[in-house]
Image (cartoon, rainbow, N blue to C red):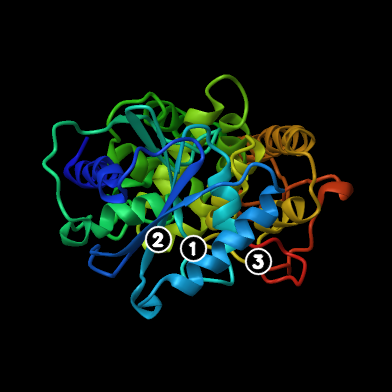
């Protein structure tokens, strides 16, 4: 674990002694922090299994709101659940409208803990709880704001990008490559980034450039990312590339990552979070937004998008070859190529994600 994870792990390890009893699968802890990561308050609550989850969560949320002082100082919150996961999500949803801050989630099971993450089941890797810690007052313990932000918003861009936009003088060969060749380069970069090794900013830089500069490559990368056994690892690589990218490239990368996350059935909340950063008024952004709003099955949509991406690549490649063979053909630049969605799958390009009256809240 890095230093930030260690601080969060130590906080979690000290919670039972601070609360005064062992925490079981009936318990949840709500923790509130100020802007510097200092604890404002933490409260242990017990889940009543004999009543509907929605009612229990609402009752607990209003009780905590009424008893928690210094609400105006709360900058970050966590909901920590023990034993079997699932109740924390109900409580987080109930907090919407009650507190100004949307909490992040942590799951403690046995001697390990996990944070909310962009994975198929919504949880990141398990970390061991530190042992043999000296008792401490949690109000004197500071958890790094960066560690809290990573838990609260794992779909938001990094504060400092890991790479710059690819310089124009290094892209000459790419500009003169065929659409299929550019796609192969992008897929190779995606493969390396999804291999589970430390991220290579140079590969992220190359992948970001190709996705942002060529809509045909963007479609092909998306179609490849959401198929096969490696789809979750590839989608995770797309999300990490978006988060690490410089601001000008984030909208196109967020659109691609949000579409991949939706099509691989990732949790609803991070997909909506990604859409906040996506290209507004673009067909793919609107398509994903509308699909979530109308509860369209991602499996059906995935087949449509994969087929459309392959067909678009074939058509644009044929046009490129004809142009470079000297045969007369209608000019069509790769970036201006139009996605050939079936009519039933198209969404209104003027639909801005998250602004419709019926659009689901994160």
Write down the residue under mark 3: 354
- The earlier-in-sequence mark between 1 and 3 is 1
Query: Would you identify the image quadrant in which residue 67 lies?
Result: bottom left
- The earlier-in-sequence mark between 3 and 2 is 2
Residue 32 percent location from the top left of the image = 36, 63
Residue 234 percent location from the top left of the image = 49, 31
Q: Is residue 89 left or right of residue 125?
A: right
Position above or below: 180 against 201:
above
At numbered mark 1, what does the secondary structure look like: helix, strand or loop? loop
Q: Residue at x 47, y 52 (%)?
A: 45
Residue 143 percent location from the top left of the image = 23, 55
| Front position among marks 1 and 3 | 1
Q: Residue at x 28, y 70 (%)?
A: 35
Q: Are marks 1 and 3 in contact (CB under 8 Å)?
A: no
Q: Is residue 166 left or right of residue 133?
A: right
Q: Residue at x 57, y 19 (%)?
A: 229
Write down the residue under mark 2: 77
Residue 353 percent location from the top left of the image = 66, 64
Out of 292 and 149, give the one closest to the viewer: 149
Can residue 75 be seen from the camera position used here? yes
Q: Is residue 305 left or right of residue 247?
A: right
Rounded to the nearest whole Å, what is the CA distance between mark 1 and mark 3? 17 Å
Out of 147 and 300, give the one closest to the viewer: 147
Query: Would you identify the image quadrant in which residue 73 lies?
Result: bottom left
Q: Are marks 1 and 2 in contact (CB under 8 Å)?
A: yes
Q: Residue furthest top?
A: 229
Rounded to the nearest whole Å, what is the CA distance between mark 1 and mark 2? 7 Å
Quadrant of the snapshot with the C terminus: bottom right
Q: Residue furthest bottom?
A: 72
Q: Residue furthest left?
A: 134
């Amino acid at each position: 674990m890095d230093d930030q994870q260690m601080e969060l792990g130590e906080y979690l390890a000290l919670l039972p002694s601070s609360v005064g009893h062992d925490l079981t699968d009936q318990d949840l802890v709500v923790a509130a922090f100020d802007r510097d990561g200092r604890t404002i308050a933490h409260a242990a609550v017990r889940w009543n299994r004999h009543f509907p989850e929605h009612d229990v969560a609402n009752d607990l949320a209003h009780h905590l709101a009424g008893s928690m002082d210094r609400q105006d100082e709360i900058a970050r919150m966590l909901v920590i659940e023990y034993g079997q996961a699932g109740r924390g999500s109900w409580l987080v949803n109930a907090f919407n409208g009650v507190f100004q801050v949307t909490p992040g989630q942590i799951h403690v099971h046995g001697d390990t803990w996990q944070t909310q993450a962009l994975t198929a089941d919504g949880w990141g890797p398990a970390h061991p709880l530190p042992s043999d810690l000296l008792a401490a007052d949690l109000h004197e313990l500071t958890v790094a704001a960066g560690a809290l932000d990573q838990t609260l918003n794992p779909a938001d861009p990094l504060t400092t990008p890991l790479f710059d936009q690819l310089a124009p003088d290094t892209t000459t060969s790419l500009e003169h490559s065929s659409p299929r060749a550019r796609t192969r380069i992008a897929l190779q970069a995606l493969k390396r980034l999804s291999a589970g090794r430390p991220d290579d900013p140079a590969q992220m830089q190359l992948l970001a450039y190709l996705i942002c500069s060529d809509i045909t490559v963007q479609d092909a990368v998306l179609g490849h990312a959401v198929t096969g056994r490696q789809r979750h690892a590839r989608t995770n690589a797309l999300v990490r590339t978006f988060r690490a990218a410089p601001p000008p490239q984030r909208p196109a990368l967020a659109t691609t990552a949000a579409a991949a996350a939706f099509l691989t059935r990732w949790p609803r909340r991070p997909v909506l979070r990604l859409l906040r950063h996506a290209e507004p008024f673009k067909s793919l952004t609107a398509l994903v937004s509308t699909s979530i709003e109308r509860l369209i099955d991602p499996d059906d949509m995935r087949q449509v998008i994969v087929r459309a991406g392959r067909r678009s690549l074939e058509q644009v490649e044929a046009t490129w070859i004809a142009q470079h063979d000297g045969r007369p053909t209608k000019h069509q630049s790769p970036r201006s190529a139009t996605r050939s969605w079936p009519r039933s799958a198209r969404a209104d390009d003027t639909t801005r994600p998250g602004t419709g009256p019926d659009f689901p809240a994160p």
